[in-house]
Amino acid sequence: MSVEVYYDDDADLGLIQGRTVAVIGYGSQGHAHALSLRDSGVDVVIGLPAGSKSRPKAEEQGLRVLTPAEAAAEADVIMILAPDTAQRGLYADSIAPNLAPGKAIFFGHGFNIRYGLIKPPADVDVAMVAPKGPGHLVRRQYVDGKGVPCLVAVEQDASGNAFGLALAYAKAIGGTRAGAIRTTFTEETETDLFGEQAVLCGGAAALVQTGFEVLTEAGYAPEVAYFECLHELKLIVDLMYEGGIARMRYSISDTAEYGDLSRGPRVIDSRVKEEMRKILGEIQSGEFAREWVAEDEAGRPNFAKWRAEGTAHPIEETGQKLRAMMSWVDRPITETA
Ligand SMILES: NC(=O)C1=CN([C@@H]2O[C@H](COP(=O)(O)OP(=O)(O)OC[C@H]3O[C@@H](n4cnc5c(N)ncnc54)[C@H](OP(=O)(O)O)[C@@H]3O)[C@@H](O)[C@H]2O)C=CC1
Ligand SMILES: CC[C@](O)(C(C)=O)C(=O)O
Ligand SMILES: [Mg+2]
Ligand SMILES: [Mg+2]
């Protein structure tokens, strides 16, 4: 592999155990980082606004909860795990006034640093520890004695040991058990945004909805269309996840494989690839970030409209009815470990 990968033996847990870490936000990532840091012997304090609905959850887990400003003032390392759009205001109001030389500010995603929305002073370390999985899986893996691979990056090395500190943090949440890959804020941010827009969320959701529409508009039963376009996707993705596209093709019938090889490139054709390049260009130029920040500042009118349209899509009603028949779909991955 051409990337640098670091494991438990490369990381010194002592570097983080001697510090107080403020985890700002207690959602998907925040709860996983905070609980695993604590279980790794790190002094943890949670930063949440007074009215936050996450407060009772953190307190029930025995964590000390302060306001973001109070937590940032106490901490040596401040991990920002609030929503990306909240981070700029949070930083200006609560974090920046409580930074001091020698402190470190950490992120779980590089958006605000990459697009210059947060500009920390030169005398603090700026690093990222970004698990490549949802927070609930990060926590579940840690509890099981395993880990989710992490991306680790340093944007600013004021102390001279920012990378060591970030690796220690990754070890404390189980990341170096699986492997921590060194990257940059730019690479993590741009690839993360591209992946979620073009392939994982945007691309996959549009593919599923469009396939469902083509079948139902042609008169096929929505229930049958749901099974073919959404339900079985998990089976196929699980095969790819376990052994790549080759493993999936090995497992399916020859009829399916011939259809895949001969028809797939007609669906995802050169026009789609060109559109993907355009989307990547908008991410690289900052156009997407400017659009999203403006949309958020305007109260998210398009976001709300598109979200409502997605919820009203006929595939959702069909899916709700069918999932009620599936006794095994009863443990959402959002359940706390
Ligand atoms: N979801 C994931 O699996 C992944 C997320 N990331 C990154 O991790 C970061 C956190 O995302 P995620 O865990 O999904 O976020 P969530 O939306 O799950 O949780 C956000 C948390 O921040 C709190 N919060 C909201 N506003 C503020 C504020 N102004 N100050 C302090 N806390 C606030 C929320 O409290 P309340 O309950 O009151 O709303 C909630 O506890 C993001 O940068 C994201 O890109 C990276 C990899 C994967
Ligand atoms: C794929 C979506 C993601 O990038 C993630 C869970 O990694 C996100 O921003 O939520
Ligand atoms: Mg991601
Ligand atoms: Mg993302």
Image: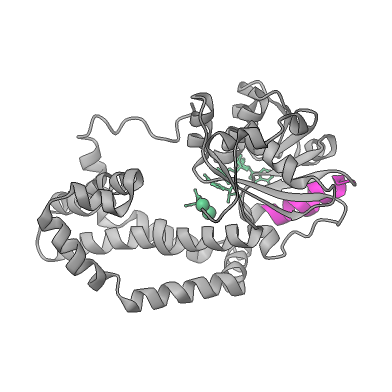
* Residue at point 80%, 52% (across, down): 157
* Residue at point 73%, 30% (across, down): 45
In which quadrant of the rendered view does residue 218 lie? bottom left
- For residue 48, say whether it is visible: no
Is 68 rendered above or below residue 262? above
Give the residues drawn in magenta, as a range. 87-100
Is 20 rendered above or below residue 212? above
* Residue at point 75%, 34% (across, down): 21
Q: Would residue 11 be found to the left or right of residue 256 on screen?
A: right
Expressed as whole percent of the image width and height from the top left, the position of residue 287 reads: 59, 74
Expressed as whole percent of the image width and height from the top left, the position of residue 24 reads: 69, 40
Expressed as whole percent of the image width and height from the top left, the position of residue 113 reads: 70, 59
Residue 210 colored in magenta in the image: no
- For residue 326, say whether it is visible: yes
Q: Would residue 306 be found to the left or right of residue 43 on screen?
A: left
In which quadrant of the rendered view does residue 121 lie? bottom right
Q: How many marks?
A: 0
Expressed as whole percent of the image width and height from the top left, the position of residue 95 reads: 80, 47
* Residue at point 36%, 30% (across, down): 331
Q: Who is closer to the viewer here, 92 or 314?
A: 92
